[in-house]
Image (cartoon, rainbow, N blue to C red):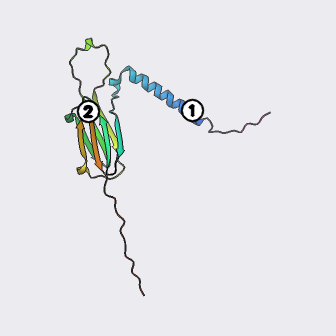
Amino acid sequence: MTLVRWEPFRNVASLQDRINRMFDDAFNKARDIDENAMGAWRPSVDIFETETAIVLEAELPGVTRDDITVEVENNVLSLKGERREIREVEEERYYRRERIVGRFHRAFTLPVDVNHEQIKANFQNGILRLEVPKPEEKKPKKIAIQVEN
C-alpha cells in the first residue's frame, strides 16, 4: 500500500479557476442575449501616470461633451454620461444592432490627494483625457540640533 501525503489545499486553485470560468460563461451568455437590458455599456478606460500627473483616457464614441460629467469627491473620480440613440433607421429595417446606448458610470479611486481645481479635461475624437496633477511631495523638514556645552 502506497502512502499519499494529504494536502487539503492542493486543488483549491483549480477549483477557483473552474468557478471563475463558470461565472464568466454565465455572464457572457447573458450579455449576448441582451446587453442593453443589462446596462452593460462601460466605456474602456486607460489610467497611467507621467512625471507630473495621473492620466485617465476614456473611449466615448458617439457621446457629446455636454453628455459627460466628471466629479471628484473624497479621492474618487467619477465619470458619468450617456450615449443617446440616434434614430435614422426604422427599427424593423435593422439586420443587427451591436452598439449600446444608454447611461454609464465609472468610478476610480485616486492614489493621492489632488487639487480639484487643477484637473485638466480634453475631449477630442471620442477620447476624453483627464490629467490629474500630482501634488507636490512634502519635503522633509530639517530640524536644527543645538549642542549644549
Kindly state the secondary structure of the residue where label 1 is placed. Answer: helix
Residue 22: where, in percent of width, then height?
50, 27
The numbered disc on residue 126 is 2
**Most common SS among magenta residues:** loop
Q: Is 2 within the magenta?
A: yes
Residue 65: where, in percent of width, then height?
21, 35
* Closer-to-camera residue (147/124): 124
Relative to 18, 51 lies left or right: left
At 28% from the left edge and 32% from the top edge, which residue is drawn? 60
Residue 123: where, in percent of width, then height?
23, 37
Is disc 2 surrounded by few (<14), some (14 to 19) or many (20+) residues within 10 Å?
A: some
The numbered disc on residue 15 is 1
At 32% from the left edge and 24% from the top edge, which residue is drawn? 36
Farthest-out residue, top: 92
Is disc 1 surrounded by few (<14), some (14 to 19) or many (20+) residues within 10 Å?
A: few
At 34% from the left edge and 34% from the top edge, which residue is drawn? 44
Residues rendered magenta in the picture: 1-5
Q: Amino acid at mark 2?
A: Gly
Quarter occupied by the N terminus: top right
Relative to 35, 66 lies left or right: left
Q: Amino acid at mark 1?
A: Leu
Q: Is residue 136 above or below residue 30?
A: below
Farthest-out residue, bottom: 149
- Sequence-first tag of 1 and 2: 1
Residue 84: where, in percent of width, then height?
23, 27
The answer to whether the residue labelled 1 contacts the one labelled 2, judged by CB atoms less than 8 Å apart, is no
